[in-house]
Image (cartoon, grey):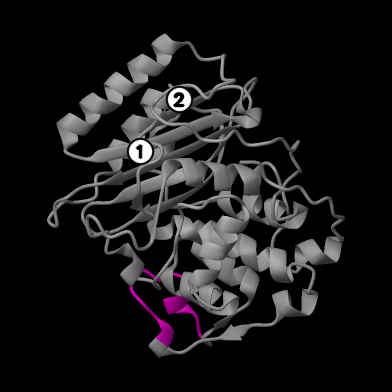
Amino acid sequence: MTSSHRSTSISRRSLLAFGGAATAGLVASSVAAPTTGAQALPHGTASGGGDHGRMSRELRALEAATSVRIGVHAVAQGGRRAFRYRGDELFPMCSLFKPLAAAALVQARGYDEAYWTTPIPFTDADLVVDSNVLDKLDPQEATPGELADAALRFSDNTAGNLILRELGGPAAVTAFAASLGATDTRLDRWEPDLNQAIPGDERDTTTPDDIAHLYSALLLDEAAGLLAASQLRAWMLRNRTSDARMRAGLTPPYDLADKTGGGAYGVVNDAGVLWRPDAAPLTLAILTSTDRADAVRNNAVVAEATRIVVG
């Protein structure tokens, strides 16, 4: 799959309309097409087969020790090296949809400065669980930029729903993902129902391959435009929800623009782009699931999987 690239200029006023400065642009490159199995992509040569074998063995051992199914896709910018483990298997998406929704909204309305500075009202009827930002607002209103900040940095569920409402509903995220070449990603419901994560239910699911492709396309390749990429980086680099997940498995110095997700059946997800000194940007998607309704969310699984793949 390759992502389209649109060059566009950004005015300072357009950036400020979002309520935050954009980060510096990154060099765009194509995203490698997924293959099957835990292995290098056809042109991936930087990581040896021994590394891939070790990572696969350690992930299998982690699955056995925790009774958690783990899916991983890690790919360096330009596809020079990649690793996949259950990469084409379906997992509950949970809040990993929120960067897709925000990117779709910026792509559609990004240069409408009046839109981004006009508050959107909501009521008590709109508030859902896990909305720690919006449930404190008085008056009950937020600009689109504030909604995106709450949804991406704090995983506020009401903010996610209000962005979906601006797009026309969950189907818009499915269509946006498909437009970028991710055909195994679908959003069917709203928060919080999309987090039910019932085994075998294909609603609201994605694959590690798709999420890695989408986040690479949006954050690195600017597939939804330069403004969308800049805004996603600005929001996701300041994510406040991954300290016990990916960030717990990384050793400084690094920069990480990521998004977490969690649901019933113990689902914990984390995905994003990692920048480290003297290394190409690495897109990493780690998704999990169980078949137990009483399973608790085990953040340490994501942290350990991060150590296994990145360490």
Quadrant where the C terminus is found in the figure: top left
- Give the residue number, with chain letter if any, for mark 1: 71
Q: Mostly what secondary structure, the magenta segment?
A: loop
Q: Which mark is residue 310?
A: 2
> 181 or 166, which lies in front?
181
Q: Amino acid at mark 2?
A: Val
Would residue 61 be found to the left or right of residue 244 on screen? left
The residue positioned 42% from the left and 69% from the top of the image is 157
Q: Earlier in the sequence, mark 2 or mark 1?
A: 1
Q: Are marks 2 and 1 in contact (CB under 8 Å)?
A: no
| Left or right of 246 on screen, residue 234 | right
Question: x, y percentage for residue 66?
Answer: 18, 36
Residue 157 in sight from this viewpoint: yes
Amino acid bearing label 1 = Gly
Q: Tell me if residue 149 can be seen.
A: no
| Image quarter in which the N terminus is found | top right
Range drawn in magenta: 126-138
Q: Is residue 21 left or right of residue 273?
A: right
The image shows residue 41, relative to residue 151, as above or below, that is above
Whether residue 132 is in magenta: the answer is yes
Which quadrant of the view contains residue 50? top left
Residue at left offset 71%, top offset 74%: 116
Counting from the top left corner in percent of width and height, residue 255 is at 58, 36
Q: Where is residue 6 drawn, in percent x and y?
A: 79, 51
Q: Disc 2 vs disc 1: which is toward the camera?
A: 1
Give the structural element (helix, strand or loop) at label 1: strand
Q: Position of residue 173 (x, y in %)?
A: 53, 65
Q: Residues within 10 Å of mark 1 (few under 14, many from 20)?
A: many
| Residue nearer the viewer, 259 or 216 | 216
State whether residue 297 is above or below residue 124.
Answer: above
| Mark-to-mark CA distance, 2 and 1 | 15 Å
Examine the structure image and report whether residue 154 is included in the region drawn in magenta. Answer: no
